[in-house]
Image (tube, rainbow, N blue to C red):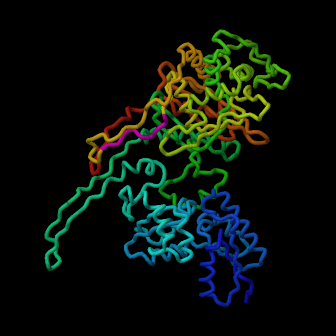
Amino acid sequence: MDTRPIGVFDSGLGGLTAVRQLRRVLPGEDIVYFGDTGRVPYGSRGRDIIVQYARQDIRFLLQQDVKFIIAACGTVSSTYPPEEAARLPVPFTGVVGATARAAVDATRNKKVGIIGTAATVRSGSYAAVIRDMMPDVQIFARACPMFVPLVENGYFNDGNPVTKLIIAEYLQELKDAGYAMNDSIGLFGAESAFESYLRGTNGRRVVSFNDQGKVTGETYSVEPVPGGTVSLTIDEGFQRDVEDALASVIEGLTAKDGITRGGAAAVIQVGTGEVLALASYPDYDLSRYFQDYQTLSADSEGRPLVNRATNGTYPPGSTLKPITAFAALDSGVTTLSEALFDSGHWTYPSSWGGGLNCWKRSGHGKVTVTSAITGSCNYYFAEMGYRMGMTTLRDYYSAFGLGSKTGIEIGDAAGSLPSQPEGQDLAPWAAFGQANQLYSPIQLANALATLVSGGQHCPAHLLKEVRSADGGEVLALGDSTTLNTIDIQPEYLDAIKKGMLGYTTGSLAGYFKDCVVTAGAKTGTAQMGGDAENNGIFVCFGPYEDPEIAVAIVVEKTKAGANITPAAVQILNAWFSAPEIDTPIQGENTLLP
């Protein structure tokens, strides 16, 4: 007989509830309990931190020579990779399966509510297991971390004053908005962003019965109002084309070098800020989100659950040079006609010393603002950064929306403007995309859209319009209001666009000869430091004369932005070759042609 103890752990003392149950069903077993009270709660932390803590807790229990480990923590049970648990030297179990079985056995109406920490609810693990046991179940999940210790310690009842306060904290906002306890609510993405348009309004029905209990009449005292029909700016067919173009380039690169990499693409309509497509790679099958969550969340290298298009932030590299060129012209530190001689090495012109090499070590010779963009001349832009200084650069970048959220309804990362340690001047490096600045693909696309529009900085947005359920009335429109207007002189914009045209008709002409429109573009290679592979960035717009769309693509570990060019051409061709995509919105229960 194995006399070793059973190990149990939780992020705090709540797991003692599991210990009590174990003592009841296994009275002869010794139990070692570890409550990580020093780092409670786990549920508010990111997945990687939760897994790290779980490993440390498990390591401690293994040192106690336990024969079995139970994660009494719902957050760990939902998050800890099952393949890692299978490799442990002793059996391991969490609480998801047992809790799901208890819920399925308890429900009488096939409705189950899940409350837990944010990480637990986000994982979808309880919902997935419950659906496996009861496929036609209705599940309502809400992150309520303060409920968890109440339930664990037996305080979850209507008479407890603490319970009442916490219920008010979590549910009062929904109650005030007219939600019933069994209503479905959009929790993530567009469903969450547009919940107020989608939900509709409950009605009230009056039913009359006779003395035999039979229904004799039925009327509505308050008519129900169905939710609206939300139309997004994203076209399904074009979205698929962008996803395919991104995947094709990444998978082609990986087939050659075996490197696992991610990437993203964003397409913005010039002059409106409408988001026409967002793609992130690797992606996943949304219909299997709950079933596959454990595998998806355990993929720390591919990170498929991260929307890189909105929340991935990257150094912009040389794709920033067109905006730097405008800043230099507009601030007056250079002119359209000024020519600098690039010898291949730019020297910092003061006693601080130092300098940098142009990527073309032999130098570009004489360069103006236009040829500096086409040649991606680091010498030229380092000089412009030095002349302007970091404060001026940051002000111009900020005016284009860099370093701030774009306004997209599903949320995005703000990124960060270039920074420098006190006493140093990193403006020469910041001017061509270095110096610790990080931006998302959607920020880069929107900044380029702002530039080629002539200075209209619009919020990025997904909402096209909202119509009544029958499609007859427009209830809301997407917000294309200009956030700020940058006064871009036409001759400045013309010089910058010509520099970007020089790419598509010069070094990248072999790719763009197959493009259905004339376009301007800029590549970028972001140096990641150390032994890390550089990221590739690519931005472009089209048509050249009257820009309609701006595109930004990032592919990780790609060495050079030019390697992304085929995806950019595919995206431009998909948009400008497609038939008219604006189609009338059909109401519910309408037969489509």
Q: Position of residue 530 (x, y in %)?
A: 79, 41
Residue 90 relative to residue 156: left or right: right
Q: Quadrant of residue 35?
A: bottom right
Q: Quadrant of residue 532?
A: top right
Q: Position of residue 71 (x, y in %)?
A: 64, 72
Q: Magenta stretch?
A: 459-467
Quadrant of image for the C terminus: top left
Residue 509 relative to residue 572: left or right: right
Quick check: 560 above or below 30?
Answer: above
Residue 179 relative to residue 549: left or right: left
Q: Quadrant of residue 377?
A: top right
Identify the residue at the far top of this view. 337
Q: Per the image, is 148 magenta?
A: no
Q: What residue lies at 79% left-to-right and 20% top-to-bottom?
A: 344
Quick check: 505 above or below 553?
Answer: above
Q: Nearer the viewer, residue 321 or 426?
A: 426
Quick check: 200 above or below 267?
Answer: below
Q: Position of residue 39 (x, y in %)?
A: 69, 64
Q: How many marks?
A: 0
Residue 452 relative to residue 422: left or right: left
Q: Nearer the viewer, residue 137 or 170?
A: 170
Quadrant of image for the N terminus: bottom right
Identify the residue at the far front of this view. 161
Q: Position of residue 213 (x, y in %)?
A: 17, 77
Q: What residue lies at 56% left-to-right and 49% top-to-bottom?
A: 283
